[in-house]
């Protein structure tokens, strides 16, 4: 049985934010992505809460996030050990990640975190279990002010 319509996401305001790519070392992976577009903007950030360092490669209308684990155990460390380098997740920007998390939970999807948390670039984030999304780890994000 479907939940009431007011619990569904407003997909007209959902857009692809980025594709996350797990890498062992950003410095080793970055030359390839720069060779695709020498004018691509690259910004670096450490997300201490998630124990990762990120390089955002911004092309004309796409962003790829190269994600490198920091020292210690992290989800990216586990991913690299199990699967090696490659696509880790697809991120969808939603108007309000808190509301989206609750809405999707009511529809039977399992969020990775009980509540969204701070992510890179001043965004709030949560993930949906790939068991519920046909094997794709989906990140939801929105600006903190949402």
Image (spheres, rainbow, N blue to C red):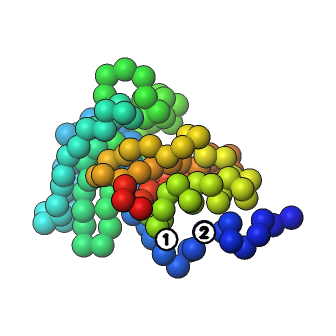
Residue appearing at x 44%, y 56% in the figure: 141
Crowding near the residue tagged with mark 1, few <14, some 14–19, many ≥20 C-alpha atoms within 10 Å:
some
Name the front one of labels 1 and 2. Answer: 2
| Left or right position of 142 against 52 | right
Q: Where does residue 27 sit, x and y in percent of width and height?
A: 20, 40
User: Relative to residue 21, is residue 18 depicted above or below?
Assistant: below
Q: Quadrant of the N terminus?
A: bottom right
Disc 2 designates what residue?
Answer: 9
Residue appearing at x 25%, y 47% in the figure: 55
Q: Quadrant of the C terminus?
A: bottom left
User: In the image as oriented, which residue stretches furthest toward the front?
Assistant: 145
Q: Examine the image and state in which quarter residue 143 appears.
A: bottom left
User: Relative to residue 113, is residue 70 depicted above or below?
Assistant: above
User: In the image as oriented, which residue stretches furthest toward the left?
Assistant: 39
Which secondary structure lies at badge 1? Answer: loop
Q: Nearer the viewer, residue 32 or 65?
A: 65
Crowding near the residue tagged with mark 2, few <14, some 14–19, many ≥20 C-alpha atoms within 10 Å:
some
Residue appearing at x 52%, y 79% in the figure: 12
User: Relative to residue 45, is residue 64 depicted above or below?
Assistant: below
User: In the image as oriented, which residue stretches furthest toward the right?
Assistant: 1
Disc 1 designates what residue?
Answer: 14
Which secondary structure lies at badge 2? Answer: loop
Q: Earlier in the sequence, mark 1 or mark 2?
A: 2
| Left or right position of 5 against 71 | right
Return the mark for residue 142: none
Label 1 with label 2: CB-CB less than 8 Å: yes
Residue appearing at x 59%, y 40% in the figure: 114
Q: Where does residue 66 sit, x and y in percent of width and height?
A: 31, 47
Separation (CA) of disc 1 from disc 2: 8 Å
Task: Tell me if residue 120 can be seen.
Answer: yes
């Amino acid at each position: 049985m479907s939940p009431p319509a007011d619990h569904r996401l407003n997909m007209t305001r959902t857009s692809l934010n980025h594709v996350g790519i797990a890498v062992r070392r950003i410095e080793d992976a970055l030359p390839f992505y720069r060779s695709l577009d020498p004018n691509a903007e690259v910004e670096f950030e450490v997300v201490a809460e998630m124990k990762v360092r990120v390089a955002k490669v911004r092309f004309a209308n796409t962003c790829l996030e190269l994600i490198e684990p920091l020292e210690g155990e992290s989800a990216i460390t586990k991913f690299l050990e199990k699967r090696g380098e490659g696509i880790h997740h697809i991120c969808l920007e939603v108007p309000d990640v808190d509301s989206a998390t609750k809405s999707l939970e009511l529809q039977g999807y399992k969020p990775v975190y009980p509540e969204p948390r701070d992510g890179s670039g001043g965004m709030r984030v949560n993930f949906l279990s790939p068991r519920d999304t046909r094997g794709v780890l989906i990140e939801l994000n929105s600006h903190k002010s949402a």
